Image (cartoon, coloured by chain):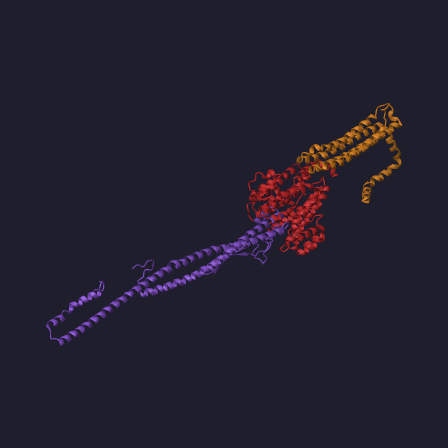
């Protein structure tokens, strides 16, 4: 009696209930994980679509921004780049991270924040104490091209914003991807390994138990048969005894007949052998 | 405009004017004598000198105005160089006018003992002097005019070759101005005779 | 009288300038460039022009940044050629043409000094036309004070600094304000040079050009300072006062303007600026700056209508600058595939 892939277990009623409970647990876990995987997948698909859209939007925005820079350079002179590079000393945009919970998965979420700063007349450093006014942090292009510079700044800010959102989505994408993979692996493991194993074990235990039951039944039958036969034999003997006695009673008291009646013991063993037939296992009974 | 110019001129010259009137009553006769006492030969040769000198001055000035522009413009457009030599030649022509008239005038002058005392001598002296003035000044101005026009012609030709002929016409008209002076000068000196004929 | 005397010292250079002006790209050449698909095509097109020797050694594909450098190089070589054979007062006049670049360079250096940057690194970023003699000693300068004391006082701009910017202002004023103060002083000085020290036809020709330049700066400063911390007094202090510019009354109104409608109302009194403002408002794809450029080119083009004056030198270099802007714009448009904006260039000579 082999139990192929199943859990090593003694086939017993107790084990059966145990395995049944474990199978139930596995099924429930499977269903829940499946649901989680589905939820993540829905989210994932949405994310994918969003990323696709945002990537296109990013490309467009960046193109716009670069073009606005070209326009600013056209208006304010080619050395605008150096002027801006040299006059910037602190980033006005910061990226902050918050975590979002999707079906138990922590997803980092980036957000672009404007650091409030007023244009300080003294370049030294009074920036940062912000009065909520965020625009025009420098006077770049005051003499010429100021509007183009401002337009360019806005365009780049929009592009940066889009990129931060894209980064946020991309990170969520990777995290979700990983989470979905793990969940799917678990689901598959439950579906293809654990549950079949339990089921097999269960089948094994059930079949073993059935087998035992059938054996018991057969044995009972056998015993019953034998008992019945013994009873019949005894009845027959008793009847024969009664008949013989009757004959004895009716006939003359016969020594030979009396002798026949004493040899009944050896006849009985032969009968037993007949009843057991070909099954040697029953013999000791 | 005219009033302003007059007032500024009068204020500038007023001192001189007073001086003039102070001298005028007594000296007037002497001034006439001054001119009479100058030898007609002087007038005649000053006239010749003016004719040739001012003409050459005008021609030279015109050539340098034209020439500077011509050289500069032909740096980028070498094709204009030979065409625009016409402008230089026009300026040169001004000097030629001068020398022609000077020669004509010089042939009117010759040495004769006592020739400078006649009334004809006085006439001839003034006539040659006047002719020299006319020719000299007209050629000077003509030379300048041709020079400026020639300079513009070179620049215009460098920009656009079709303009050359059009500006050349302008230049020809400018050049004709000198010719007027030459004609007048020859006419004026035609009657003069300072001892050359005898 | 300039007709008679001008050519003695400057006739050759003026004629050369006009020769160079003939090589300024025309509308048909711009049209050819607009048909280009790549920057390489632009190079091919430019190979038919004066720019050919400047672009032939550039690696493929042609970068717009390299294009800027090469085109600027061309202007600089033109300028050096002219400047080396100029007599006074043309030499002074030509020097004045480099002062705006010098102002930009100095402002860049001051910014660098305030940020404690290595100044010798910044020299590469300076405009080549604005180089001055003290550039070599920059490596020993560390602080803005040293820069002021050792370098700036030796530049031709020293007088502007003395008049407008003190040594404290260097670290306290916004660098853009310093730049505009210097530019104002420069513009006024330049206008004075043209009108009084040179005079004549030059003064006649330069007056409208410089007047427009000053007016444009006034309008720009007003528009760009709206909504910033710049006070009205500070704003008014940046306005250059040049004859033939905006009327004093308009300048006064602009100095007190609070918003764009107020600016529009003030400019309504100036026929030129009103027309420009109106056109910019009528064409949403064109900015006021574009209109200014266009009008400036028109004025500069008119400078070539007269002979025997220095205005052609100014006009030539400004037009070349506009040409570089145009070419860079076209190259950028083509490189960035923004063909819809190609029409923004200002045709210099039709």
Q: Which quarter of the image is occupied by the C terminus of chain C? A: top right
Residue in the image at 51% along x and 55% along y? A51
The residue positioned farthest toward the bottom in the image shown: A250
Q: Residue B77, percent across and down? A: 67, 35
Task: From the rendered image, report the letter of the chain displayed in red.
Answer: C
Q: Quadrant of residue B161?
A: top right
The residue positioned farthest toward the front in the image shown: A251
Tell me if residue B157 comes above or below residue C172 in the rendering.
above
Tell me if residue A18 comes above or below residue C239 in the rendering.
below
Task: From the rendered image, report the letter of the chain displayed in purple.
Answer: A
Find chain B in the image and tell me its colour. orange
Q: Is residue B31 visible?
A: yes
Q: Which quarter of the image is occupied by the N terminus of chain C? A: top right
Q: Is residue B46 left or right of residue C203?
A: right
Q: Nearer the viewer, residue B86 or B139?
A: B86
Q: Residue A24, percent across and down? A: 38, 64
Q: Residue A160, percent across and down? A: 55, 53
Residue in the image at 67% along x and 47% along y? C294
The residue positioned farthest toward the left in the image shown: A255
Tell me if residue C153 comes above or below residue B96 in the rendering.
below
Q: Nearer the viewer, residue C173 or A99?
A: A99
Q: Residue B179, percent across and down? A: 80, 32
Q: Is residue C317 visible?
A: no
Q: Is residue B58 left or right of residue B19?
A: left
């Amino acid at each position: 009696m082999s139990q192929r892939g199943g859990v090593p277990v003694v086939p017993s009623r107790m084990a059966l209930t145990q395995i049944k409970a474990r199978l139930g647990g596995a099924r429930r876990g499977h269903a829940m994980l499946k649901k989680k995987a589905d939820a993540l997948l829905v989210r994932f698909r949405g994310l994918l679509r969003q990323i696709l859209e945002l990537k296109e939007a990013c490309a467009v925005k960046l193109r716009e921004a670069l073009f606005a820079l070209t326009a600013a350079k056209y208006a304010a002179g080619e050395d605008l780049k150096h002027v801006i590079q040299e006059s910037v000393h602190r980033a006005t945009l910061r990226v902050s991270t918050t975590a979002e919970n999707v079906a138990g998965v922590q997803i980092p979420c980036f957000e672009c924040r404007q650091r409030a700063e007023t244009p300080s007349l003294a370049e030294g450093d009074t920036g940062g104490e912000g009065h909520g006014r965020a625009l025009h942090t420098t006077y770049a292009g005051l003499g010429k091209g100021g509007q183009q510079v401002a337009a360019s700044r806005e365009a780049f800010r929009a592009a940066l914003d889009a990129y931060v959102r894209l980064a946020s989505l991309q990170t969520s994408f990777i995290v979700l991807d990983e989470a979905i993979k793990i969940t799917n692996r678990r689901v598959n493991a439950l579906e293809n390994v654990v549950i079949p194993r339990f089921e097999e074990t269960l089948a094994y235990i059930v079949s073993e138990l059935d087998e035992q039951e059938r054996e018991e039944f057969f044995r009972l039958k056998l015993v019953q048969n034998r008992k019945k036969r013994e009873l019949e034999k005894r009845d027959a003997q008793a009847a024969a005894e009664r008949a013989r006695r009757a004959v004895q009673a009716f006939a003359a008291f016969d020594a030979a007949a009396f002798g026949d009646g004493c040899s009944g013991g050896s006849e009985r063993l032969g009968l037993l052998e007949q009843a057991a037939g070909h099954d040697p296992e029953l013999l000791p009974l | 405009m005219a009033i302003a110019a007059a007032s500024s001129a009068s204020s500038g010259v007023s001192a001189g004017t007073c001086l003039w009137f102070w001298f005028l009553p007594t000296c007037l006769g002497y001034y006439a004598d001054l001119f009479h006492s100058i030898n007609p030969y002087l007038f005649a040769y000053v006239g010749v000198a003016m004719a040739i000198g001012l003409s050459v001055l005008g021609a030279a000035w015109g050539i340098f105005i034209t020439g500077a522009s011509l050289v500069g413009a032909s740096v980028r457009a070498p094709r204009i160089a030979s065409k625009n030599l016409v402008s230089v030649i026009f300026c040169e022509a001004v000097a030629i006018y001068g020398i022609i008239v000077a020669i004509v005038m010089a042939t009117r002058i010759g040495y004769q003992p006592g020739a400078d005392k006649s009334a004809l001598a006085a006439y001839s002296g003034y006539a040659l002097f006047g002719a020299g003035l006319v020719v000299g000044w007209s050629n000077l101005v003509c030379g300048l005019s041709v020079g400026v026009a020639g300079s513009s012609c070179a620049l215009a030709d460098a920009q656009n070759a079709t303009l050359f002929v059009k500006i050349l016409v302008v230049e020809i008209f400018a050049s004709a101005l000198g010719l007027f002076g030459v004609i007048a000068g020859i006419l004026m000196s035609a009657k003069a005779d300072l001892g050359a004929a005898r | 009288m300039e007709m008679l005397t001008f050519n003695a010292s400057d006739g050759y250079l003026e004629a050369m300038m006009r020769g160079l002006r003939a090589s300024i790209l025309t509308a048909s050449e711009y049209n050819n460039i607009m048909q280009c698909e790549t920057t390489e095509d632009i190079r091919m097109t430019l190979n038919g022009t004066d720019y050919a020797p400047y672009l032939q050694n550039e690696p493929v594909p042609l970068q717009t940044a390299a294009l800027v450098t090469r085109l600027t190089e061309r202007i600089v070589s033109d300028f050096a050629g002219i400047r080396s054979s100029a007599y006074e007062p043309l030499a002074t006049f030509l020097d004045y043409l480099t002062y705006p670049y010098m102002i930009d360079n100095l402002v860049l250096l001051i910014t660098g000094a305030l940020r404690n940057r290595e100044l010798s690194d910044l020299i590469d970023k300076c405009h080549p036309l604005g180089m001055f003699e003290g550039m070599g000693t920059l490596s020993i300068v560390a602080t803005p004070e040293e820069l002021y004391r050792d370098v700036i006082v030796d530049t031709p701009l020293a007088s502007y600094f003395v008049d407008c910017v003190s040594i404290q202002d260097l670290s306290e004023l916004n660098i853009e304000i310093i730049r505009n103060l210097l530019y104002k002083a420069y513009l006024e000085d330049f206008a004075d040079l043209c009108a009084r020290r040179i005079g004549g036809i030059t003064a006649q020709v330069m007056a409208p050009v410089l007047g427009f330049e000053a007016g444009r700066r006034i309008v720009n400063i007003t528009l760009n300072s709206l909504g910033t911390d710049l006070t009205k007094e500070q704003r008014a202090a940046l306005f250059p006062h040049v004859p033939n510019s905006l009327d004093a009354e308009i300048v006064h109104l602009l100095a007190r303007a609070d918003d764009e409608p107020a600016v529009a109302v003030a400019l309504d009194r100036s026929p030129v600026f009103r027309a420009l403002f109106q056109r910019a408002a009528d064409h949403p794809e064109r900015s006021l700056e574009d209109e200014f450029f266009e009008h400036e080119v028109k004025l500069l083009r008119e400078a070539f209508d007269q002979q025997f004056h220095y205005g052609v030198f100014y006009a030539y270099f400004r037009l070349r600058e506009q040409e570089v802007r145009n070419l860079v714009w076209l190259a950028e448009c083509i490189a960035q595939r923004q063909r819809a904006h190609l029409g923004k260039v200002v045709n210099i000579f039709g």
